[in-house]
Image: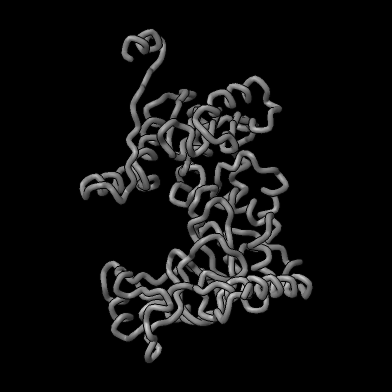
Amino acid sequence: MRAELEPLGRSYDVVVANPPYMGAKNMNKWLSGWVKDSYPDVKGDLFSCFMVRNSGMGSEHAQMGFMTPYVWMFIGTYEKLRRFVIEQNTITSLIQLEYSGFAGATVPICTFTLEKGKAEGYKGGYIRLSGFPGADQQAPRALEALADPACGWFYRRDADTFKQIPGSPIAYWVSQALISSFGKGIELDNISDYTGSQNITADNELYLRRWWEPSNSGNRWIPYSKGGNFRRWFGNHEYVVDWSEQAKYFYKNNSTSNLLNERYWFQEGITYSDITSGRSHFRFLPAQGVFDKKGPEICMLGKNLFSILAFLNSSVCQQYLYLLNPSMTLQVVDVKKLPLLKQIFDSPIINGLTKGNINLSCSDWDSFEISWDFKRNPLV
């Protein structure tokens, strides 16, 4: 590699390195402390620290190329890094690979180039390969996009546009109309009680059961929302959690567990599964139990509950969520940013259709033996 770089080094400052990939939770005590002190705004992973460090080594207008996990483009942990990239540098090009973009590996990778310094109004080139599964398609489709920008997966975007979206995700493929709608709606966070609070048992083998396992004598076991498979409107009521005084004492006082704030106990609301297969799915949750991180709940929606549930299960909402975070983990912070239009609130038509969908989904759920309201198979 040195021989290839020497000609460039005669005229330019050249730095080539293999960026480290290590999340904060895997760092030892010394490394974790050093990263927090040296790179407090980008401490989530060593690769993000490397991006900032590499930028600091270059002169004004330095050209930088990176290949990193593309999580920095979307999730809340890297919002300050995105601001750094957008406000102090210029994204000149970016290719977002498909999950299986490399043979033998399934990893979320992007490759991109930056110019140090802000070039106002510059529209970088972006190629989105997420719609082409398999490593064998990535290079040919990228070359096709470069040869024909009208192909449908090549985009031009001024990075300042991203600042119009909450959290500034690098959502280069989104229309300006969709981006502008964030300024017209009311954030879900402003009309709900949705803090991301959760119950953590720290010992599911001891404190968690399928609902048919315990006798529930003395109301010790209560329903527990814990995500589950793809299902909208109603269902996935399979678990119960130990809610005895002894168990709650453990959740509250054990160092690795957490007792859900009492204000969220037995609240009617909307729940969902935080791990998705690409499509989000929201469900009505009766006021009968509590929830954990895998099945968080949006509470205190009042008369707007059914209209909001309808919006959350709409194709429009799916576009918003994919804009905010296209990964397989649907984070609380992303759902809280969703914009809602006042026109949908307290609509008799929307409420009626939503309640009808809930009833249909409930009847379907009760036709399976895993439902606690199962009576008989409808085919019998």
Instruction: Give residue 208's position: percent from left, percent from top.
Output: 36, 73
For the question of whether residue 261 can be seen, the reply is no
The residue that appears at 58% across and 54% down in the rendered structure is: 279
Which image quadrant is residue 247 in?
A: bottom left
Q: Residue furthest right?
A: 349
Q: Residue at x 45, y 43 (%)?
A: 81
Q: Looking at the picture, how far across and down is residue 181, in whole percent? A: 70, 53
Residue at the front extreme? 380
Judged left or right of residue 286, residue 206 is: left
Quadrant assignment, res 190: bottom right
Can you tell which quarter of the image residue 316 is in? bottom right
User: In this view, which residue lies farthest toward the left?
Assistant: 30
Q: Where residue 298 appears, x then y in whole percent?
A: 55, 70
Rendered view: 194 above or below 145: below
| Residue at the limit of the structure toward the bottom, as seen here | 218
Q: Is residue 160 above or below residue 103?
A: below
Q: Quadrant of the C terminus?
A: bottom right
| 143 left or right of 247 in image | right
- Against 298, residue 281 (above or below) is above
Q: Give x and y (percent) for residue 45.
A: 36, 44
For image coordinates 36% across by 80% down, the residue present is: 242
341 to the left or right of 230: right
Q: How is the image coloured?
A: one colour
Residue drawn at 43 percent across, 69 percent down: 292
Evaluate whether residue 365 shows in this view.
Answer: yes
Front residue of 51/127: it is 127
Position of the N terminus, as image quadrant, is top left
